[in-house]
Image (cartoon, rainbow, N blue to C red):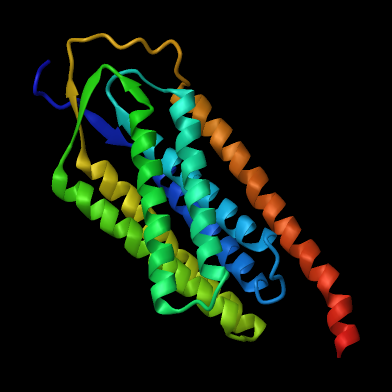
Amino acid sequence: MQDTMLPHHWNPALIVLSFLIASVTSFLALELARRFRQDGSVTAPLALGGVLGYGIWAMHFIGMIAFELSTNVTYGLPLTLISGLSAVAFLIGASFYMVRGTPTLPRILVSGVIAGIGICLMHYLGMAAMQANAVTSYLPVPFALSVLIAVGAASVAFFLFSRVMTATYSLVQRLAIQTGAALVMGLAIAGMHYTGMAAVRFNMSTEVVNLVSGTDPQNLVYMVVGATILVFVGTYIAILADQLSTKPSRMAGD
């Protein structure tokens, strides 16, 4: 092994796409959180945690593929899927914990810790899924900082969720608040990811890694973006359908 870092560069289009995915994910999650006031069923935290977990995972992989090494890179499918499932599982767990009781500050912080752990686990499992002719190492300070940002960003997200769950706004106020909050959350989510990427070092290796069983990054981008569009469109249609189904009951109650 040589202690020489592999040259790399960033794909700006994929960086922008990763931020957009994080922001849209945040907006949809805020809208789902708002529905909790009208839906106390089990499906509410499942929907919130599922959409948030998947969106963060999708943003992570697009952002990771934006980091282009000067060597062939593929991704092992089993670890890639496990990383996504871990994000969804932890975010669902955090959502359940927050909404099954009064969203007090301690409950929000615990939910943030649970979600932050899941985000970090997802990120570094995803990094482990990378297959390349390189030796991977991590700088301790950026690594620790990425963990703190993940927990902090998740805690802020759940605080915002609690606000839209308990407060009443006009349509214009709600859209302005949710859009601004979504952009802030998108920056926070992306900040954790790119801080984690700053922690990793890829050094040249004399060992040859078998890349045959992995998935090509370009194909992975197509698959993740396609699946993300389907998830986002499906979630938005479900929200619209829920709004239409609750209007008659509200009018009858009035």
In the picture, measured across the screen, residue 188 lies left or right of residue 26, that is left
Extreme residue in the left direction:
3
Q: Residue at x 66, y 63 (%)?
A: 44
| Quadrant of the image containing the N terminus | top left
* Residue 210, quarter of the rendered image: top left
Q: Residue at x 78, y 70 (%)?
A: 243
Residue 118, image x, y percentages: 41, 49
Residue 102, image x, y percentages: 53, 78
| Quadrant of the image containing the C terminus | bottom right
* Residue 222, quarter of the rendered image: top right
* Residue 206, quarter of the rendered image: top left
Question: Where 142 sits versus 223, above or below?
Answer: below
Question: Where 178 sits versus 205, above or below?
Answer: below
In the picture, measured across the screen, residue 66 lies left or right of residue 3, that is right
In the picture, measured across the screen, residue 246 lies left or right of residue 173, that is right
**Number of numbered callouts drawn:** 0
Residue 28, image x, y percentages: 60, 61
Question: Looking at the image, can residue 199 be seen?
Answer: yes
The one of 16 and 87 positioned closer to us in this rendering: 87
Q: Residue at x 45, y 37 (%)?
A: 83
Q: Residue at x 21, y 10 (%)?
A: 207
Residue 58, image x, y percentages: 50, 43
